Image (tube, rainbow, N blue to C red):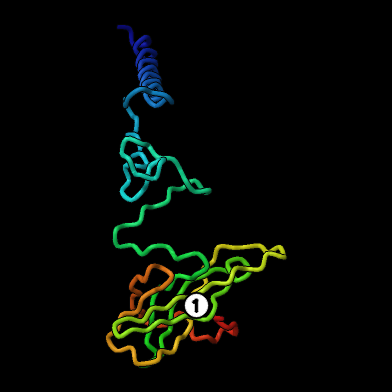
Amino acid sequence: MDAGLRRWLVPAGAALAVVLVMAAVWWSQRPGDPGPGFGSAPAPPSASSVPGFPGQDGGGDPADPGQPDRPDGGLTPVPGPDAAPPPQAGTQAIEGWFARDDTTLALNYATGIPECYGTVGEPQVAETASTVTVTLPKTPPKSDREVVCIDIALMRSVDVTLQSPLGDRVVRDGSRDDTRIPRADAPYSDGSEGEPAY
């Protein structure tokens, strides 16, 4: 083969090989491809195959691909068997308790802006020989004015005074079917924010 022809054919052959490889990659990654091909990524798992997420009917059926059920497009997780139930309407869930002394408990809770989420009222306490059940009533916000609501958690504490020392009694949340409230390491607040808890 003549040297001038070889000098022209080698770069042309290399360019043709590059074009063919690029065409093969493009062909295998085009939308609607019936199966995996060269360079294609595996399909992501369906929402219902992720543990803890329901399918379209909320049942978590593996055969059901699932549909977003929240306004932001996400899926609502299914609570586990040990998860506390949501609080009853008109009440505030308690996240933890801290003993300030033998008869005073600080109850920790998380809420939102009072103008948007309401305020917590005076705690209701029911004592027995083995339990202390506390319910935090919640007053809804006034709706007679326009308020811009932002998603921010306000960590608050409210104190309750018991009729007798706590001792080894179990503290329960009356707003969540008397679910046991875990002990906290400290109160969320000491009431010095200038805003009364109730």
Residue 157 x/y as whole percent: 47, 80
Foreground: 59 or 2? Answer: 59
Residue 183 x/y as whole percent: 34, 79
Q: Amino acid at mark 1?
A: Arg
Foreground: 116 or 44? Answer: 116
Residue 174 x/y as whole percent: 41, 73
**What quarter of the picture does the C terminus occupy?**
bottom right
Q: Secondary structure at mark 1?
A: strand
Image quadrant assignment for residue 100: bottom left
Q: Which residue carries the number 1 mark?
A: 156
The correct choice, above or below, for 186 with respect to 178 in the image is below
Residue 162 x/y as whole percent: 40, 89
The correct choice, above or below, for 2 with respect to 40 in the image is above
Position of 112 compared to 56: left or right? Answer: right
Q: Please give the count of numbered marks on the rendered protein.
A: 1
Foreground: 73 or 175? Answer: 175
Q: Residue reaching furthest right?
A: 145
For image coordinates 68% across by 64% down, the residue present is 143
For image coordinates 33% across by 29% down, the residue present is 39
The correct choice, above or below, for 147 with respect to 40 in the image is below
